Image (cartoon, grey):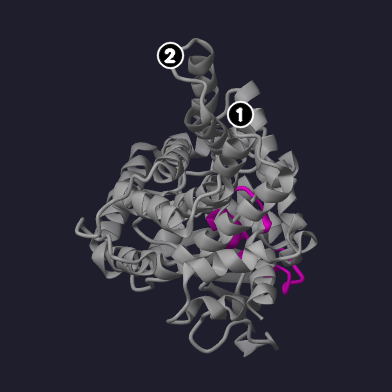
Amino acid sequence: MIQDSIVELLKEEVVPASGCTEPGAVALATACASAQMQGPISSIHVTVNPNIYKNGVAVGIPGTGRTGIPLAAALGAIKRHPERQLLVLADVTAAETEAAQRMIDDDIIKIDVDTQKTYLWIKAVVQSGGDCCEVVIDRSHTNISSIRVNGIPSLGKKQTVGDGRHDSRAFLYADDLTLASLIEAIEGLPLEKIEFLKNGITLNLHAAELGLTQKRGMGLGRMYAEMAGDGVLADDPVTYARMVAAAAADVRMSGEDIKIMSSAGSGNHGITAILPVYAAGRKFDIPDDRLIRAIAISHLITIYVKIHTGSLSALCGCSVAAATGATAAIAWMLGGSMEEIAAAMTMIVANLTGMICDGGKVGCALKLATASGAAVESALLARRHVSVPATNGIVATTIEQTIRNLGQVANPGMLETDKVVLDIMLSKDAAAARSESPHEKQEQAAIRQGR
């Protein structure tokens, strides 16, 4: 039954995460490998696909005040708690941070990028004395598909079906699936089956409130609030959505040690899928039961779009996936017909397709603000019968075909864009490494070790 499949999917895809999910997935891989070892770690070698690298290189690691994949890899190996999955980087202590930094300073951590891997992929090889463990994560952030200890496979249960699709997503691949049928299914769900989604509002709103009261990251959300208070910006649903989404992103991407409710494997997707819907709900006095159903719609359509665009791509998923889910949810929540819901979704695709993902970083707050404001605005326009003609660009006569067209833009359309973005980021890293002299590196290491 499709309703049972929807509930199962939402429980799997809407989960708490601490910090950015790409460094979190790297930490999960090294934690899993390290947990198989008995003695001290002698080396860590992590290889990732380009998009894991892109999203992990500049984002804050929770509770450390620092950034980078090497730090995430070291912390995962130190913590050794793979059962925590995307919360593996929660509650990092100062002692753990310093121990991780010593591993980096001792040059026992190596990070490589496998440009041939076009899907989410991480391989962590951890050595301790004469023992070696290799862990592979692929297709999704928590899907550990292989564990080999000293070359011997030790993972008893295969976690994906043959083509890498998750069992819980299988119903979304049906050729005759319509978005109308998904929304109708959520309308008919007993509310108690999706009440767990309220926790996402609590977690993500807490992050937003922190960003509105304390400067974190760029301080974008806080500045939106200040400008609205000064009358420079209108105190309306669009500005409110931008404000809370940006504030939550400010906090999350700066490395604050908080939990965020993710969606489709991304904390920023979770922020964009939840907070604009919440913002519109509060501004229009929507009852809680209808708000919860709207958020279920938002998550479900976010996942549906991600199936077509890929888990990680050159496109900003917050803009083309989560914002599409959010605008559908808002249009539905405000009483929109299926035609109006499709029109709102089409406006997001027509408006924001082409916004690139150039990695996880504090600047993501700008994109989340844009996506969240557009989600509210598109829903309001659609309710007033504004729509994009099917003759325009990648827009098709049905929303389902429009989403498929969007997927074609992402892959193969923007594969070369992704390579160029990665090349730019790698060249920046190389230039930064060259600019730091050996003496400076030794001096910084000595400071960290208290000498």
Q: Residue at x 70, y 75 (%)?
A: 4
Q: Which residue is mark 1?
A: 211
Disc 2/disc 1 C-alpha distance (Å): 20 Å
> Residue 435: x and y, percent?
34, 37
Q: Is residue 350 left or right of residue 383?
A: left
For the question of whether residue 101 can be seen, the reply is yes
**Residue type, mark 1 in image:** Gly
Q: Residues within 10 Å of mark 2 (few under 14, many from 20)?
A: few
> Residue 194: x and y, percent?
73, 60
Near-viewer residue (444 or 188)? 188
> Residue 144: x and y, percent?
62, 75
Mark 1 element type = helix
Mark 2 element type = loop
Q: Residue at x 50, y 17 (%)?
A: 228
Earlier residue among tags 2 and 1: 1
Image quarter of residue 128: bottom right
Q: Which residue is mark 2?
A: 232
Of the 4 image quadrants, the one containing the N terminus is: bottom right
Region rendered in magenta: 15-40
**Residue type, mark 2 in image:** Val
Q: Residue at x 28, y 49 (%)?
A: 424
Q: Is residue 48 left or right of residue 264?
A: left
- In this rendering, which labeled residue sits more in front, label 2 or label 1? 2
Of the 4 image quadrants, the one containing the C terminus is: top right
